[in-house]
Amino acid sequence: MHSSDALTRFQEAAILWSAGSGTATDVIDAACGCLVVGLDSPTLRILASITPTRGNDSDELRRWLEDALTELSLAYYRQGSRAGEEAALRVMAHRLLAGTIGPRDLTSWAYGFITHEGTPLAAELINLGNAYEYVDAIYEGHRQPSTEVEAIDAAVTAEARRLINDAPAENG
């Protein structure tokens, strides 16, 4: 793994954690990955040394994460923040376009972690998730015409591209 890959993994883990989608262990593992490839900072070492235990790993992570990200010139998003939700949405959109998740996975994730009360940027993906459910309900377990699902898949992919192309130059 290259240092840029490790930084990306660390940034994404921190973003997903801030949106409630990732775990403290994911962030700590990504911090360790940064150290393994030679990236170093005082707070990164502290963060990487946290031993995840039920209940205190998020407290310790909250204490050190912002400084560790700042030392590596990465963006920090407060847990539950609108900016963090938007960044997480873009991380997941990138994953769809990279082929690591499917269109339905993206809509399910948006519905589960962003919800209707979250950032308005997720609204179209949530609506498209509802479209999948509507098609499922109409056919009640019978074979669905692939064109209907393919059309929704294409709309999800187009929305993911829009989210990435509309991304602000600097998050924070």
Image: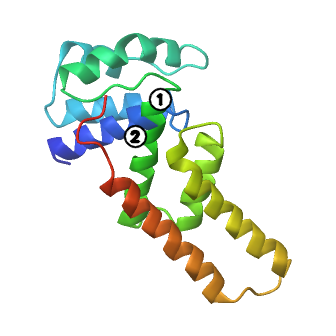
131 shown above or below 108 = below
For the point 46% across and 37% down, the residue is 16
Residue 106 position, x and y percent, is: 54, 58
Q: Residue at x 50, y 22 (%)?
A: 52
Label 2 residue SS = helix
- Residue 57's label in the rendered image is none
Q: Earlier in the sequence, mark 1 or mark 2?
A: 1
Image quadrant assignment for residue 39:
top left
Residue type highlighted by circle 2: Ala
* Relative image position of residue 124 (x, y in whole percent): 56, 57
State the residue position of label 2: 87
Q: In the image shown, does 25 or 151 lie closer to the viewer? A: 151
Q: Quadrant of the C terminus?
A: top left
Q: Residue furthest left?
A: 38
Question: CB atoms at circles 1 and 2 under 8 Å apart?
Answer: yes
Q: Which residue was labeled with disc 1? A: 18
Q: Look at discs 1 and 2 and give the one toward the viewer.
A: 2
Q: Can you give x and y, in whole percent of width and height, for residue 10 in the image?
A: 31, 35
Observer able to see residue 141? no
Hey, which quadrant is residue 45 in on the image? Answer: top left
Vertical side of 104 occupied by 11: above or below: above
Residue type (three-letter) at the residue carrying disc 1: Ser
